[in-house]
């Protein structure tokens, strides 16, 4: 029996090739989009889940509260790790990761000297390996280093390198203790090398080492704990939270505490945590899930509408089957089988489309998903559900609609009363389809405009043509870079030679640049005391920094070498700092006293200038106060403003000078505007995906509309023929065909515009700086929908209208 149903279904598909092809292509495209989105979501949800006992692993966050705000930071003090290990009985292992980029060097008799600047070098406890279940690692010995296999091949050309020596930062000799596998791509923690944690204190100067060991304020390390199986999380959290009250000074006890955040939450639930490795948000997963469902819904609506319309051409066939003894159940199975067969074929085509689609998905999102992801158990299970659900959704209603047709109407070749109810269902589905498509178009426009605004918004300084040259790599020590008198002299000579190049407009130095993470330091401004716990982002800059980046002064003066004392006692602050400190105005701030650090040992001075606020962080966060001073030992980065044109030649000249003055350092460069744009990678991915899927939704809607219009026109062929005989114009006939569908599109506009406004307004609310939802955005989406409808229906209508009335009326 099922074989007979299959043959009948197959013959029906072949007999109606055009309609079947349109239904197949629309459903296949919708399924392929859904598959790609589900693959992306599955990958996002899999982050950090591969670690053994991942459900028992937590990151220790540093929480600052007070002054009406709460800040959560991913880094905690180095002292927190040993304290947790000592006091928290529920903890099985504690691991600290301290990122400090540096040069690794190997002198090999065969391979020669190999030197590279490495950004993903971490100082780590032996407990780190136990927390994450890393096998084969060994960090027990002093000056030990653990390499990934890729790093071993990079430096030694092979993997069996245990016992070999490496040089770190041109001075510290390390011994390769073990070689391990790199962590997979779906991890938020990535390293190329781990150095035993105690080695950190021998690399830094004694003063910095003592500070890192004992300070309870500076969030230096990412610290993770693994709880014992079955241990009480609530008890562990309570003990961890109380550590700052037990070990911290009065300032720490007043405003800071530790908290535990599940490792499984840091990828999608911690984008607001400062220093979090992931900027992705669970909100984007909800958005992508909704898009996948809506695109699949559009494709299924297409299928349902075309199947219903096509059934009107099969009335005689259905009547004959009923007269021949077929009952409703058999007809239901037959037509449901046709729907499932076509859905199955669409599913196969969608799988074929998904393989090259992965390349586009990788290009858009920056992932490296391979085709074998399609064979994962979780993905196959989702795909099976997609096939069954889509097949039933696309086939069940057309099958019910067809079997409900009355025999008396079928024998007359008419659908009877079902035509009215069928029209209403089709109209409702068309409205739903266009509501989704219009909302996606509005979303794509809004997201694109918001990202364009973030990229192009004046930041308060000139970010263009600014080359960034890190002297100590991309993650140097933020406390003290170790710039002594001799190195400072070479840095000055390098600057002078750069200025002599006609392609260079300006050169400066700083400890940090916009787009990087600014360390917050304790300040005691005039009118406040140390216990007020005022922490402000802090940058150490050279004398010509403000003029080089183009940040305008609003009061006072810039730093100057001529005074001879600015490096000892001068501060420049921004307008937000003036308001934070409670001072009346920028002019009032000039001459105010300030201490950076604690009252006893901090740097004492006064405010000499106030600059206009400039955005040195992400634009989805409010403007922060900023304090700047001249502090040479903290300088880590050159900023070179160059003239446009012949950039490769200018960079080559920079490299040549660099190799002359800093032969022990690696030359690296980037452009500041690109570094800032990289802050919005998650939003860029969202924008591109929504844009592509909005176009696909429109395309699917158009194909369905085109096919549906052909059926509607075919139904009214005789009516059109009579109207032409009676003298109706082509324009009036086209308007006749357009009238009903345009009414549905306009109704869809009235539903989709408020819905889209609510959704996009909610999305924009997460940005401190955002666009307004202008009326023309919604008007553009509406006009686009109307034009597409007119073109689609008009083209099909003209084809039918051109048919001679003699042909359309020959059977009457």
Image (tube, rainbow, N blue to C red):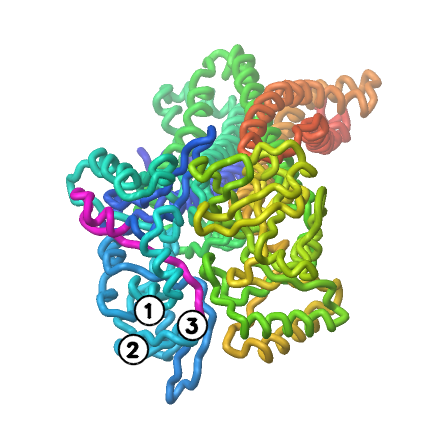
The answer to whether 282 appears left or right of 137 in the picture is: right
Q: Quadrant of the C terminus?
A: top right
Tell me the residue that label 2 is attached to: 161
Tell me the residue that label 3 is attached to: 169
Q: In what element is the residue under mark 3? A: loop
Q: Residue 181: x and y, percent? A: 31, 64
**Total labels drawn:** 3
Specify start and end residues of the magenta stretch as a single range: 81-102
Q: Do the residues labelled 1 and 2 touch (CB within 8 Å)?
A: yes
Magenta stretch contains residue 86 = yes
Q: In what element is the residue under mark 2? A: loop
Magenta stretch contains residue 183 = no
Q: Residue 525: x and y, percent? A: 54, 40
Tell me the residue that label 1 is attached to: 147
Work out how far the residue at label 3 is from the one at label 1, CA to CA, in angstroms.
16 Å
Q: Quadrant of the N terminus?
A: top left
Q: In what element is the residue under mark 1? A: strand
Q: Residue 764: x and y, percent? A: 57, 32
Label 1 CA crowd tier, 10 Å (few <14, some 14–19, many 20+): many
Work out how far the residue at label 3 is from the one at label 2, CA to CA, in angstroms.
20 Å
481 up-or-down from 693: above or below: below
């Amino acid at each position: 029996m099922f074989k007979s149903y299959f043959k009948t279904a197959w013959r029906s598909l072949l007999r109606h090739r055009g309609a079947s092809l349109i239904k197949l292509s629309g459903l296949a495209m919708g399924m392929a989009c859904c598959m790609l989105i589900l693959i992306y979501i599955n990958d996002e949800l899999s982050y950090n889940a591969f670690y053994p006992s991942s459900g028992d692993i937590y990151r220790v966050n540093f929480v600052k509260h007070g002054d009406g705000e709460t800040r959560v930071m991913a880094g905690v003090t180095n002292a927190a790790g040993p304290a947790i290990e000592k006091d928290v009985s529920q903890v099985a292992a504690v691991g600290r990761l301290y990122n400090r980029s540096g040069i690794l060097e190997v002198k090999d008799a065969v391979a020669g000297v190999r030197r590279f600047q490495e950004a993903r070098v971490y100082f780590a406890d032996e407990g780190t390996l136990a927390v994450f279940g890393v096998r084969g690692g060994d960090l027990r010995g002093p000056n030990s280093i653990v390499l990934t296999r890729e790093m071993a091949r990079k430096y030694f050309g092979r993997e069996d390198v245990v016992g070999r020596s490496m040089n770190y930062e041109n001075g510290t000799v390390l011994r390769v203790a073990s070689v391990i596998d790199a962590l997979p791509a779906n991890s938020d923690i990535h390293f190329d090398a781990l150095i035993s944690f105690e080695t950190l204190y021998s690399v830094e100067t004694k003063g910095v080492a003592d500070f890192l060991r004992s300070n309870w304020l500076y969030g230096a390390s990412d610290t993770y704990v693994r709880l014992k199986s079955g241990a009480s999380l609530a008890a562990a959290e309570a003990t961890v939270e109380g550590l700052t009250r037990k070990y911290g000074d009065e300032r720490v006890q007043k405003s800071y505490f530790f908290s535990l955040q599940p490792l499984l939450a840091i990828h999608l639930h911690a984008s607001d945590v400062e220093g979090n490795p992931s900027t992705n948000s669970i909100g984007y997963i909800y958005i992508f899930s909704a898009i996948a469902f809506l695109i699949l819904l559009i494709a299924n609506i297409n299928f349902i509408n075309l199947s219903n319309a096509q059934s009107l051409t099969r009335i005689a066939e259905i009547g004959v089957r009923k007269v021949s003894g077929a009952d409703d159940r058999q007809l239901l199975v037959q037509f449901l089988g046709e729907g499932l067969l076509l859905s199955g074929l669409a599913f196969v085509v969608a799988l074929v489309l998904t393989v090259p689609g992965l390349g586009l998905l990788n290009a858009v999102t920056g992932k490296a998903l391979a085709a074998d992801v399609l064979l994962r158990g979780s993905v196959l299970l989702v795909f099976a559900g997609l096939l069954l659900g889509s097949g039933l959704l696309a086939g069940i209603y057309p099958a019910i609609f067809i079997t409900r047709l009355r025999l008396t109407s079928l024998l007359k070749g008419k659908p009877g009363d079902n035509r009215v109810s069928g029209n209403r269902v089709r109209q409702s589905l068309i409205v739903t389809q266009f509501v989704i498509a219009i909302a996606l178009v509005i979303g794509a426009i809004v997201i694109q405009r918001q990202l364009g605004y973030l990229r192009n918004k004046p930041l308060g300084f000139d970010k263009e043509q600014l080359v960034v040259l890190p002297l100590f790599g991309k993650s140097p020590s933020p406390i003290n870079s170790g710039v002594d008198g001799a190195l400072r002299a070479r840095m000055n000579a390098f600057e002078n030679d750069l200025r002599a190049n006609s392609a260079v407009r300006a050169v400066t130095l700083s400890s940090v640049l916009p787009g990087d993470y600014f360390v917050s330091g304790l300040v005691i401004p005039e009118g406040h005391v140390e216990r007020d716990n005022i922490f402000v982002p802090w940058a150490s800059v050279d004398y010509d920094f403000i003029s080089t980046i183009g940040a305008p002064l609003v009061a006072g003066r810039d730093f100057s070498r001529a005074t001879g004392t600015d490096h000892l006692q001068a501060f420049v602050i921004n307008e937000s700092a003036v308001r934070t400190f409670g001072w009346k105005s920028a002019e009032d701030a000039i001459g105010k006293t300030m201490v950076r650090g604690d009252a006893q040992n901090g740097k004492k001075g006064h405010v000499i200038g106030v600059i206009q606020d400039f955005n040195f962080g992400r634009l989805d966060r409010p403007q922060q106060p900023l304090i700047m001073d001249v502090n040479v030992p903290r300088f880590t980065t050159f900023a070179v403003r160059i003239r446009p044109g012949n950039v490769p030649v200018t960079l080559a000249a920079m490299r040549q000078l660099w190799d002359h003055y800093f032969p022990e350092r690696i030359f690296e460069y980037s452009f500041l505007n690109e570094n800032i744009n990289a802050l919005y990678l998650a939003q860029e991915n969202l924008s591109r995906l929504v844009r592509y899927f909005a176009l696909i939704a429109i395309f699917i809607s158009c194909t369905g509309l085109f096919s549906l219009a052909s059926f509607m026109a075919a139904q009214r062929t005789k009516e059109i023929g009579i109207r032409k005989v009676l003298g109706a114009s082509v324009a009036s006939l086209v308007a006749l065909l357009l009238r009903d569908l345009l009414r549905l599109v306009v109704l869809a506009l009235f539903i989709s515009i408020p819905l889209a406004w609510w959704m996009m307004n909610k999305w924009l609310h997460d940005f401190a700086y955002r666009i307004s939802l202008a009326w023309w955005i919604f008007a553009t989406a509406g006009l686009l929908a109307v034009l597409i409808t007119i073109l689609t229906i008009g083209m099909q209508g003209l084809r039918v209208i051109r048919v001679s009335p003699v042909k359309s009326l020959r059977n009457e």
